[in-house]
Image: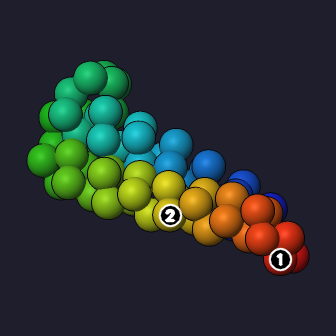
Amino acid sequence: MWPFLVPGVIVAAVGLVWTLQGIGLLQGSAMTGSSLWATVGPIVLVGGLVLIGIGIARRRRGTR
C-alpha cells in the first residue's frame, strides 16, 4: 500500500501545483500562465490519483 500511496500523494500534489501555475492561479514562477504546464499538470495529477487508487485497492484486498 505505502509504496503506491505516498508517491501518489506527492505526484498528485505536484500535478496540482503545476496545473494551478499553468492556468495562472499561482503566481511567481516561470511556469505561470504557460499552456505547457496547464496541460502537463493535469496529466501528472491523474497519474498521482491512479497511484493513490492502486494503494487503496491493495489495502482493501490485504495485499502487501
Please indicate whether residue 11 sits to the left or right of residue 60 in the image: left
Marks 2 and 1, the one that precedes in the sequence: 2
Q: Which residue is drawn at 83% across and 77% down?
A: 63
Residue farthest front in this picture = 61
Q: Name the residue that disc number 1 marks.
A: 63
Front position in the image: 34 or 47: 47
- Secondary element at image label 1: loop
- Secondary element at image label 2: helix
* Residue 55 seen from this side: no
Residue 4 placement (x, y as % from top left)? 69, 66
Residue farthest bottom in this picture = 63
Q: Residue at x 86, y 76 (%)?
A: 64
Under mark 2, the amino acid is: Val
Determine which quarter of the picture holds residue 33.
Answer: top left
Q: In this view, does 38 lie above or below 50?
A: above
Determine which quarter of the picture holds residue 51.
Answer: bottom right
Q: Name the residue that disc number 2 marks.
A: 50
Under mark 1, the amino acid is: Thr
Residue 23 placement (x, y as % from top left)? 19, 34
Q: Residue at x 16, y 43 (%)?
A: 34
Please say if the residues under marks 2 and 1 sit with CB atoms less than 8 Å apart.
no
Please indicate whether residue 5 sits to the left or right of residue 36 in the image: right
